[in-house]
């Protein structure tokens, strides 16, 4: 039976994720009936919107065979730059938003440049980027008249509405997430650019010989992830009503978890936006549901860490035919 | 002459020169920096990073990565601090911490080798789990009231200079360096990291070498945890958060290649001293220590990029030389491509 399912690939990764998601909703619904209200479920996205948005585009980076552990620090840098640009430089809030997104793109471009053009491992460069951008965020705080811990607040209502308003009864954050999923999906799976991204990850040399500018493609994926981090920073700033330098500090684990749980291989060449989106929601709902079920937020890393390890382990063990054969042999043996 | 040339080629020597240059430069701007007392303060303050970096160096040299050591440090610090607070002898506390570290390392190692989970993913997941466990263990509270006798060990110095801890760490680094470079089994780590299939072919037990590397890494993190307790005197549930990144950065600064197979623990220790001296350097240059991370990041990127460019040039030159040697000598073989 198991073999049959595996053979016919009925157990596709995405359907597995949907199954996990549904069982999560059922279990948390039983634990706490309030959880099932649409308003609560929709509103829960406030807690994990940044994971969702950033992981969508970090997927691109991992597909090229890279690694991005700096996105979390760009969230804080964007948030505080946005606040300083608006409050201390006196820019219009929307101009500030555009500049903030450009800052995110620039941060991604710097790291991406080093990864693509010098051949240094992505992990090291983005580790440096993580230090650099979180340090710069603290430096930007010094430019403002506010202190680091109070943040910059008092934004116009129109800006606050990004994070807390609704559109046709659906929270804006859900709408933004939906739009970005479609954007990411089309970009990765329906355009030439997306094919190039995959090719870079599958065989960089072959891609280069067939005329693809792999270096620019790789650099652009880091720019995309930087931009998505700044979008997340803007939404968080709007939702919390305050710009802070330390936002997004704890996001590295959940982001990478979401991307890898979504079926993207960290060796490159395999993955998809839909899987990442589903995995991000699975993680988000799990965090939210566990908190509603009465677990303290500090313990949340345990189930997420376990989920990450178990998911990847089952996948690698599953694809290892030798091991699977050994297991099924033993299984038969026991039954007989 | 040859030994001198070899010494200059060694990557840890260039990090040492870099460290000395920084010290001299800062000393030129602010002579107070070069006071013996201040230098000893820097060395003594770097002990936790030195131990973490030496531990993780094993894992990195064997071609993997471990981002769970920050959490391992936190958990083993919490466990040992609780035991000490409750009146147990320090031996019990140290052993308990070591067990914690070795267990985490063993789990990481098994996950990476037997379950074949990529090490960055495995240790990232375990990082979350162990961090959560230290919340569970401490109930989210700080562990305080560590006995004064234990705290005072970290202050005790030999001849008013280096603490016993730091001198001990120096000895350990030296011994580990010798074990890694002069014994056959020690060379296994570099062999596995350099060329895993090759190592397997010549009969090196790849999986158990990797598991050993992870266990050693966990044990070093645990020792760092105990010393953290002694130095700081209390443990928060977030203790050691982000230290893993600093330890990795220290290794990179010390000339260890993240692709594995290249580098020494001495380099890691030097890198750790550079890392932890940055914040003090900033103080002496009258910058705010807020810029600590910024400088670390810039330094890391510059060093790694420069290293990559130099390496590329070296290999290009080597290839060119080989090519010209082949064309000049009349052998005309293409087999050495």
Image (spheres, rainbow, N blue to C red):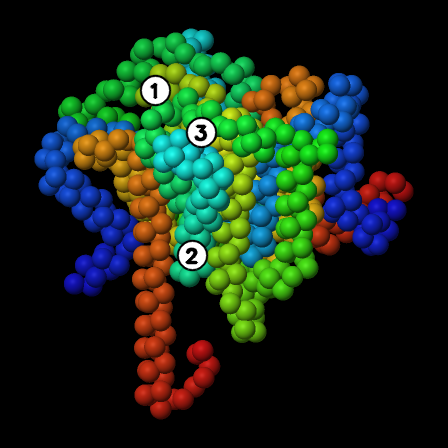
| Chain letter belonging to callout 3 | A
Q: Nearer the viewer, residue A160 or B34?
A: A160
Q: CA distance from mark 2 to mark 1?
A: 40 Å
Q: Residue at x 42, y 34 (%)?
A: A86
Q: Which residue is mark 3?
A: A244
Q: Secondary structure at mark 3?
A: loop
Q: CA distance from mark 1 to mark 3?
A: 28 Å
Image-based side of A27 in relation to B287, left or right: right
| Chain letter belonging to callout 2 | A
Image-based side of A15 in relation to B102, left or right: right
Q: Position of residue B292 (x, y in %)?
A: 31, 35
Q: Residue at x 40, y 89 (%)?
A: B332
Q: Residue at x 71, y 24 (%)?
A: A40
Sequence-earlier tag: 3 or 2: 2
Q: Which residue is mark 2?
A: A113
Q: Nearer the viewer, mark 2 or mark 1?
A: 2
Q: Which residue is mark 1?
A: B232
Image-based side of A202 in relation to B198, left or right: right
Q: CA distance from mark 3 to mark 2?
A: 27 Å
Tag 1–tag 3 contact (CB < 8 Å): no
The image quadrant of residue A170 is: top right
Residue A112 appears in the picture as rendered: yes
| Mark seen at residue B200 | none
Q: Position of residue A161 (x, y in %)?
A: 59, 30
Q: Nearer the viewer, mark 3 or mark 2?
A: 3
Q: Position of residue B166 (x, y in %)?
A: 27, 30
- Mark 3, Cα crowd under 10 Å, few <14 / some 14-19 / many 20+, is many
Q: Position of residue B319 (x, y in %)?
A: 36, 74
- Mark 2, Cα crowd under 10 Å, few <14 / some 14-19 / many 20+, is many
Q: Residue at x 51, y 36 (%)?
A: A233
């Amino acid at each position: 039976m198991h073999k049959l399912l595996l053979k016919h690939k009925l157990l596709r990764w995405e359907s597995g994720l949907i199954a996990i998601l549904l069982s999560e909703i059922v279990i948390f619904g039983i634990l706490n009936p309030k959880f099932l209200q649409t308003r609560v479920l929709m509103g829960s996205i406030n807690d994990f919107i940044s994971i969702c948005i950033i992981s969508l585009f970090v997927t691109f980076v991992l597909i090229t065979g890279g690694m991005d552990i700096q996105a979390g620090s760009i969230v804080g840098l964007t948030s505080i730059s946005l606040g300083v640009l608006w409050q201390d430089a006196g820019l219009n809030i929307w101009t500030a938003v555009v500049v903030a997104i450009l800052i995110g793109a620039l941060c991604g471009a710097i790291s991406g440049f080093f990864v693509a053009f010098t051949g240094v491992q992505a992990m090291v460069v983005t580790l440096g980027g993580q230090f650099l951008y979180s340090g710069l965020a603290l430096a930007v705080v010094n430019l403002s008249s506010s202190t680091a811990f109070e943040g910059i607040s008092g934004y116009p209502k129109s800006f606050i509405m990004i994070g807390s308003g609704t559109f046709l009864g659906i929270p804006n954050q859900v709408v933004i997430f939906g739009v970005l999923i479609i954007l990411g999906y089309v970009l990765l799976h329906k355009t030439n650019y997306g094919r190039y991204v995959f090719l870079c990850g599958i065989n960089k040399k072959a891609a280069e010989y067939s005329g693809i500018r792999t270096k620019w493609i790789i650099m652009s994926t880091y720019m995309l992830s930087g931009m998505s981090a700044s979008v997340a920073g803007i939404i968080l700033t709007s939702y919390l009503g305050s710009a802070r330098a330390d936002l997004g500090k704890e996001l590295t684990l959940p982001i990478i978890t979401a991307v890898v749980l979504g079926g993207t291989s960290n060796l490159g060449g395999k993955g998809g936006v839909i899987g990442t989106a589903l995995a991000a929601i699975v993680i988000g709902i799990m965090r939210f549901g566990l908190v509603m079920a009465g677990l303290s937020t500090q313990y949340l890393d345990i189930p997420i860490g376990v989920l990450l390890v178990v998911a990847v382990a089952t996948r690698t063990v599953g694809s290892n035919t030798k091991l699977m054969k050994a297991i099924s042999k033993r299984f038969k043996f026991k039954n007989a | 002459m040859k030994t001198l040339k070899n010494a200059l080629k060694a990557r840890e020597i260039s990090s040492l020169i870099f460290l000395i240059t920084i010290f001299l430069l800062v000393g030129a701007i602010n002579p107070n920096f070069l006071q013996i007392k201040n230098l000893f303060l820097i060395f003594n303050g770097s002990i936790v990073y030195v131990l973490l970096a030496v531990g993780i160096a094993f894992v990195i040299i064997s071609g993997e990565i471990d981002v769970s050591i920050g959490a391992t440090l936190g958990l083993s610090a919490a466990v040992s601090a609780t035991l000490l607070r409750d009146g147990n002898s320090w031996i019990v506390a140290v052993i308990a911490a070591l067990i914690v570290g070795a267990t985490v390392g063993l789990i990481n190692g098994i996950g990476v080798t037997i379950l074949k989970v990529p090490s960055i993913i495995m240790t990232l997941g375990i990082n979350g789990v162990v961090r959560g466990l230290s919340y569970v263990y401490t109930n989210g509270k700080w562990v305080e009231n560590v006995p004064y006798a234990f705290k005072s060990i970290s202050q005790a110095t030999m001849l008013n200079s280096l603490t016993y801890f730091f001198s001990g760490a120096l000895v350990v680094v030296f011994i580990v360096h010798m074990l890694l470079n002069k014994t056959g089994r020690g060379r296994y780590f570099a062999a596995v990291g350099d060329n895993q299939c090759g190592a397997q072919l010549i009969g090196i037990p790849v999986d158990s070498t990797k598991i050993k590397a992870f266990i050693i890494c966990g044990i070093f993190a645990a020792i760092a945890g105990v010393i953290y307790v002694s130095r700081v005197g209390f443990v928060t549930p977030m203790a050691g958060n982000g230290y893993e990144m600093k330890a990795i950065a220290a290794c990179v600064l010390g000339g260890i290649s993240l692709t594995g197979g290249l580098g020494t623990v001495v380099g890691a220790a030097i890198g750790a001293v550079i890392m932890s001296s940055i914040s003090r350097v900033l103080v002496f240059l009258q910058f705010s220590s807020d810029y600590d991370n910024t400088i670390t990041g810039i330094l890391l990127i510059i060093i790694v990029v420069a290293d990559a460019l130099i390496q590329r040039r070296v290999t290009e030159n080597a290839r060119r030389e080989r090519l010209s040697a082949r064309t000049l000598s009349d052998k005309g073989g293409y087999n050495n491509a």
